[in-house]
């Protein structure tokens, strides 16, 4: 109950304070390339329930139909605005709407697309999906340079599935069994610190067009 109350207050205040920035980013995205300001995609939430995640669009409008689910750093589908938004993680800000709705939490395992959730071992799947997915978590901090790592591989999706996803699931299982409000606050602080020190070549890889 305390976690949900924290999520509601945090996300509502964030949307209120960041409203001018959100409007500016939305305008920039629409002027930078053809297409809408927002990207919506199906992700798997708590108890396996699918939901639509919101992000600012960082790729060309037809990106989902013209390339793989994993996008590495040098993906040609990424727009000029998209490169900067991904590096700064400002493309993730609309997810405060997902938190307000109740599909996500501020802190929790990052929600995956169905095709990757299908790869979860059965026992791990039930644990990871027992909590709401989040905007940030320990794995997001550890793999903040994920797109750079994947960009060095000739097969980014294989590297993601075989090397990165198992580590993310370890973090997710640990979070599901040990999360607390104090722990969430520490992850938020670590996330802010990581973003502050993030260099231009770093940034998490993102799924299917955003």
Image (cartoon, rainbow, N blue to C red):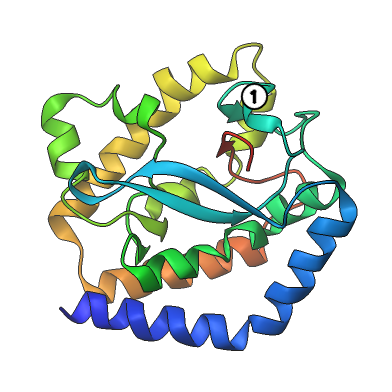
The relative height of residue 119 versus residue 85 in the rendered view (above or below) is above
The relative height of residue 115 versus residue 142 in the rendered view (above or below) is above
**Residue at image x 41%, y 18%?**
162
Residue 186 visible, this angle: no
> In which quarter of the view is residue 89 placed?
bottom right
Residue 183 is situated, as x and y percent measured from the top left of the image, at 28, 69
Q: Is residue 149 left or right of residue 173?
A: right
| Depth check, front residue: 34 or 123 | 34
Q: Quadrant of the N terminus?
A: bottom left
Residue 149 is situated, as x and y percent measured from the top left of the image, at 62, 30
**Total marks placed:** 1
Q: Is residue 174 left or right of residue 96?
A: left
Q: Which residue is mark 1?
A: 65
**Residue at image x 84%, y 46%?**
34
Q: Quadrant of the C terminus?
A: top right
Residue 114 visible, this angle: yes
Q: Residues within 10 Å of mark 1 (few under 14, many from 20)?
A: few
Residue 10 is situated, as x and y percent measured from the top left of the image, at 41, 82
Residue 172 is situated, as x and y percent measured from the top left of the image, at 27, 45
**Residue at image x 14%, y 26%?**
122
The relative height of residue 96 versus residue 173 in the rendered view (above or below) is below
């Amino acid at each position: 109950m305390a976690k949900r109350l924290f999520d509601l207050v945090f996300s509502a205040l964030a949307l209120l304070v960041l409203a001018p920035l959100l409007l500016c980013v939305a305008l920039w995205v629409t002027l930078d390339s053809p297409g809408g300001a927002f990207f919506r995609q199906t992700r798997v939430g708590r108890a396996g329930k699918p939901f639509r995640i919101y992000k600012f669009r960082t790729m060309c409008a037809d990106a989902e139909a013209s390339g793989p689910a994993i996008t590495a750093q040098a993906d040609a589908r990424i727009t000029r605005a998209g490169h900067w938004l991904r590096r700064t993680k400002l493309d993730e800000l609309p997810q405060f709407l997902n938190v307000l709705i109740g599909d996500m939490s501020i802190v929790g395992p990052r929600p995956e697309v169905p095709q990757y959730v299908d790869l979860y071992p059965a026992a791990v799947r039930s644990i990871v999906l027992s909590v709401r997915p989040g905007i940030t978590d320990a794995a997001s901090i550890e793999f903040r340079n994920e797109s750079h790592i994947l960009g060095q591989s000739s097969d980014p999706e294989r590297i993601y599935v075989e090397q990165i996803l198992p580590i993310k699931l370890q973090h997710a299982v640990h979070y599901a069994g040990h999360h607390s409000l104090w722990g969430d606050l520490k992850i938020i602080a670590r996330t802010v610190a990581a973003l502050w020190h993030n260099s231009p070549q770093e940034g998490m890889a993102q799924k299917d067009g955003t």
